[in-house]
Amino acid sequence: MALQALPPAAEPYARSQRAEMGAAVAAVRRLWSRMGEDFDASWAQIERQLLLTLDTAQERITAGALEYVPEVLAQTSRTVRRAEYAVDPAALVGTTGAGFGTDEMAYGAVLRAKSLAGEGADWRGALAGAGAWLTAAAGTLLSDTGRTAERMAGNARGPVRYVRMLTPPSCGRCVILAGRTTGEATAFDRHPGCDCHNIPAAEAIADDLTVNAAEYLGSLDEEGLRKALGSRANAQAYIDGADVNQLINAYRASGGVRSAQVFDRTVKYSTEGVTRRGIAYRRMSQARSVRDQGTERAGRYRSLRAPRLMPESIYAIAIDRADALRLLRLYGWVL
């Protein structure tokens, strides 16, 4: 069974766009490697070629999206409306998703290098840190360009819905959202560098474009599962029956997973799911040792004072597998 039921045009398009993005990001990385100790002087030598690389990639990605949208709509719709207006590809070239010029974005890497040098890094270390930022920013720029072109082309024939498509390998945060449908105004990216795609689809057919997260995760080897879920302990917890949504959503909020020193051991715990509306609250409240610690006000709801141990700490303190499974259930990881 396919991991995601997709129209025929979707996968070739995703591969092509990813290849364009990968080639452009690699070229940006090569150009940045020419930077020297004099940041401004060396930037002046590579700026023109680097911006031309980004402009060319944006042009190709936009052209690919404008060709793809009517094709995929024909595969997901009974009738395809004629475009009510023409999309100008030039409008998406030289501009970031936030509306800034790509020249401003790219020069941000020089400013970052100067900042790192000012904080004490040597010039090589400063350039390495700034280069990592620049390649990530370039990838995000090109992903945003493709998604914007898809939305513009789709809206010209609208209204349509957009279905979230994975481009494996995918992280757990994306896997649990794959197949979800959104409207045009809904933010689509899940995290910086996210390369998932919109599939424009007619209202009547969009719900058929689904994904089975269990099948995707089941197709991964041990290392792939570790990467998707964030740690070997999370991967083992999933194998032992933990709910993938619980595992991923533990990291949803900034600082949602924390560390604390308990006697001579450092334990990791999550603040997700411990309010009255959460699964962990209901499970943990059944344990007397947890109930005795009481609750406290957390926004609109009351929250348990007892920490919700992460699987990593559960496996570290469990005396055997049976005890680990008991604790996984107690802390709401296994449903």
Image: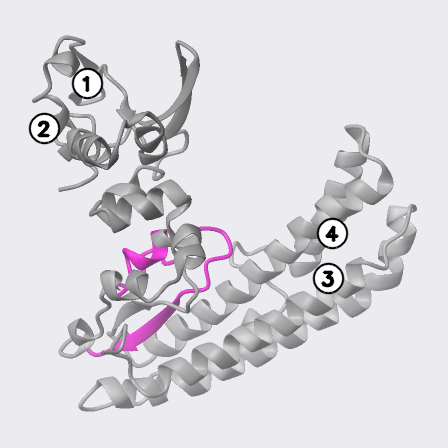
Q: Three-letter amino acid code at disc 4? A: Tyr
Q: Which residue is mark 3?
A: 29
In reply to whether residue 198 is colored magenta, the answer given is yes
- Residue for badge 2: 282
Residue, disc 4: 107
Disc 3 on helix, strand or loop?
A: helix
Of the residues tagged 1 and 3, which is closer to the observer?
A: 1
Q: Position of residue 25 (x, y in %)?
A: 65, 66
Q: Nearer the viewer, mark 4 or mark 1?
A: 1
Q: Residue at x 40, y 65 (%)?
A: 196
Measured in 3D between alpha carbons, the distance from the residue under mark 4 to the one under mark 3, in whole angstroms, is: 14 Å
Magenta stretch, residue numbers: 173-202
202 or 252: nearer the eye? 252
From what the image shows, is residue 130 above or below residue 250?
below
Task: Name the residue nearer the viewer: 49 or 229.
Answer: 229
Question: Which mark sits nearer the N-terminus, 3 or 2?
Answer: 3
Looking at the image, which residue sits at the far front? Answer: 320
User: Is 116 left or right of 229, judged from the image as shown?
Assistant: right
Tell me how far mark 4 sits from mark 1, CA to CA.
47 Å
Of the two numbered discs 1 and 3 on the same chain, state the one appearing first in sequence.
Answer: 3
